[in-house]
Image (cartoon, rainbow, N blue to C red):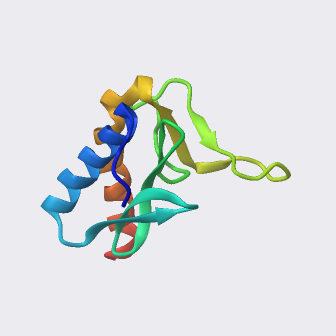
Amino acid sequence: MAKPVTKSENRFFEIASILSGEDKNIITGNMMSSPGIKYKNKVIAFYHRNEMIFRVGKEADLVKLGIRKPKFLSPFKSKPPMTGWICLGYGERSNWGKICRFALAVMKLEIDK
């Protein structure tokens, strides 16, 4: 992983470090050429352009998570947004850790059945 150069990148890497220190199955890796956090090699979150993007699943109660105006990942111009993935900018960095832990819990439920 590259050395962080911005405050938002630094926050991403802090979260990645904390989570990987808690669980040997959590590692850093890439998602679409961006630094990511993986659980058992499945991406749960990644950092791109001052945002953290989280795989929370389509069934997540975003209001309960404190997300009032969700921005969904939309990497393709000709396809609709991916509603299972949400993007949170640096202004919402206080929620990044909580949402990342939620994304991890969702992935654990899917993988560790």
Q: Nearer the viewer, residue 11 or 42?
A: 11
In the figure, residue 42 lies in which quadrant? bottom left
| Number of numbered labels in the structure image | 0
Residue 91 coordinates in the image, percent (x, y) = 43, 23
Furthest-right residue in this view = 78
What residue is rendered at 38% in x and 56% in y? 2
Asked whether 66 or 35 is in front, the reply is 35
Locate the N terminus by quadrant. bottom left
In the rendered image, residue 61, in percent from the top left (x then y), is placed at 46, 39
The correct choice, above or below, for 50 with respect to 102 in the image is above
Q: Residue at x 70, y 47 (%)?
A: 81
Q: Nearer the viewer, residue 28 or 1?
A: 1
Residue pushed farthest left? Answer: 22
In the rendered image, the vertical position of residue 11 relative to residue 107, given as above or below: above
At 47% across and 64% down in the image, what residue appears?
A: 30
Left or right, 20 with respect to 81, comes to: left
Report the residue at 85% width, 52% height from top.
78
Residue 73 spot, x, y in % from top left: 62, 46
Q: Is residue 110 above or below residue 16?
A: below
* Quadrant including the C terminus: bottom left
Instruction: Name the quadrant containing residue 25.
Output: bottom left
